[in-house]
Image (cartoon, grey):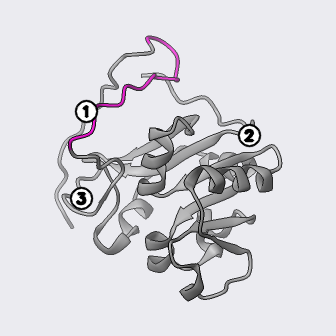
Amino acid sequence: MNDMPPQTAAGKVLWHFSMSLDGFVAGPNHTMDWVTAASHRPGLVEEYTGTTGAVLGGRTGWDACPDPGAIYGGAWQGPLFVLTHHPGDAHPTPGVTFLSCDVAEAVRIALKAADGKNVEVFSPTIGRQLLDRGLIDEIDLHIVPVLLGDGIRLFHNPGGPPVRLEFLNGGERTAAVNVRYRPTPIG
């Protein structure tokens, strides 16, 4: 399997997550402690902090982790937009703009604020809505070798049609990605 080429700041809308092997981007109650045990490739955080101009998230994720300084462990600073149906009851936070608009308008606002860099979407629900409208340029996933069994799925669309994807890491664009893991003892 080819390594992922470095991300570029090209004004893209990225749906970006670390994800468990069984498809969860957060554990129950939005817990993220399982990600810290993962070994990501060197320079990954610097790559994304250097190419990200704005972040768009959802209210449920924000309420679970209301800290704009926590993005990439505090290594990224920039405009953060939280899309919500109830902006009036959101606690005002410096650097955070609460939006109550259509997802397409939220992306337009975030792209303008990103000033030529990428917008990262940190919400499964918003990402799915943008995907339905053709407004996601790329899906960036970092698969963490853990099975959570419960939590927040990346893509939950019961009864919806399959969404075909193109592999961008070189080689055959419709190729399956092959991974092999062995369970390890706990403790």
- Image coordinates for residue 66, horizontal then vertical, percent: 54, 79
Badge 3 crowding class, 10 Å Cα cut-off, few under 14, some 14 to 19, many 20 or more, is: some
- Local secondary structure at mark 2: loop
The reply to whether residue 156 is visible in this rendering is yes
Q: Amino acid at mark 1?
A: Arg
- Coordinates of residue 12 in the picture (x, y in percent): 67, 39
Left or right placement of residue 102 versus residue 125 in this view: right
45 lies above or below 10: below
Specify the amino acid type for callout 3.
Answer: Leu
Residue at which label 1 appears? 180
Q: Which mark, residue 123?
A: none
Q: Secondary structure at mark 1?
A: loop
For image coordinates 45% across by 44% down, the residue present is 142
Q: Which residue is mark 2?
A: 11
Nearer to the camera, 5 or 129 = 129
Front label number (2 vs 3): 2
Residue positioned 43% across, 72% down in the render: 60
Start-end of magenta stretch: 159-172
Chain-order first, disc 1 or disc 3 = 3
* Residues tagged 1 and 3 counted as in contact (Cβ below 8 A): no
User: Callout 2: few (<14), some (14-19), or many (20+) C-alpha neighbours within 10 Å?
Assistant: some
Q: Quadrant of the N terminus?
A: top left
Horizontal relation, residue 16 to residue 9: left or right: left
